[in-house]
Amino acid sequence: MDERLRVLGLVEAQRMARSVFAGATARGLIAPGSGEREAGHRIGDLARRMFGTAVSRSAGIVRSGPHTILPRGQEPPDRVIREDDMVVTGLGPLLTGYASDFARTLALGDDPARHRLVEDLATVFAAGRSAFHADSGITGGQLYAEVQALAGKAGWALGGEHAGRLVGTAPTADARHADPASFLCPDNDEPLRRTTEGGWRAHWILEIRLVDEDLGRGGWFVDLLDLA
């Protein structure tokens, strides 16, 4: 596989994920009264109906309420989605062979604070991406600091140990016990625009996790950083 085909595959994986998420919300698959796992399997079924054998996942990852602030990779017990919940949907690597990632958040009910958090997720993501494009030599640590400042300015805490990772790094990898050069984290002093050890151009996933520390709830906005 050459670099051009790799990029096309990553972008197509994101397009598929966005389409599945839009379809799931339009069909009411993420709704109060459903269990998280039930909703995740419904989303997985929809993805297979839409894209067939190209889909690599059997189910989406759905987290609601207090589960939205748990670390990735931790498997909480199933929970019934409530009428006023924050609900995160993660689709992860959706296209077979391409290790991209995707997550979005819905705010159910009428609580303005929850809806503001969802709006701020997209705003902070866009501002983080703009900071990346504005500085050709930006490092992982510098972009992490920028995102952390943006989250604080919006009135939220930045969740997780990092704000993103190198494409190909496992979503559940623990940045505290791994090579910091693979993460958007304080200890990464390498430029993000570089060639990896495997000879590929480095592509990045930006993970915005905002936390309402008073409510113990949060949201995620995960997408490719350097590829539209």
Image: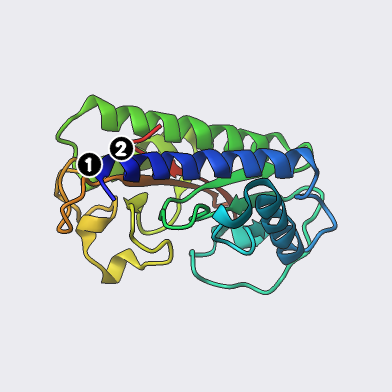
Q: Position of residue 140 (x, y in %)?
A: 23, 46
Q: Amino acid at mark 2?
A: Glu
Assess disc 1: are there few (<14), some (14-19) or many (≥20) residues with their C-alpha within 10 Å of its C-alpha. Answer: many
Q: Position of residue 71 (x, y in %)?
A: 49, 65
**Given contact means CB atoms under 8 Å apart, are the residues at marks 1 and 2 in contact?**
yes
* Residue indicated by mark 1: 142
- Colouring scheme applied when the structure was drawn: rainbow
The total number of labels drawn is 2
Q: Residue at x 38, y 39 (%)?
A: 8
* Residue indicated by mark 2: 146
Q: Residue at x 24, y 52 (%)?
A: 186
Q: Secondary structure at mark 2?
A: helix
**Nearer to me, 25 or 157:** 25
Is residue 132 found left or right of 124 in the rendered image? left
Q: Residue at x 82, y 49 (%)?
A: 83
Q: Quadrant of the C terminus?
A: top left
Assess disc 2: are there few (<14), some (14-19) or many (≥20) residues with their C-alpha within 10 Å of its C-alpha. Answer: some
Is residue 98 found left or right of 190 in the rendered image? right
**Nearer to me, 213 or 117:** 117
Let me know if residue 215 appears in the view. no
Single out the residue that lies furthest toward the right: 33
Q: Residue at x 70, y 34 (%)?
A: 112
Q: Amino acid at mark 1?
A: Gln
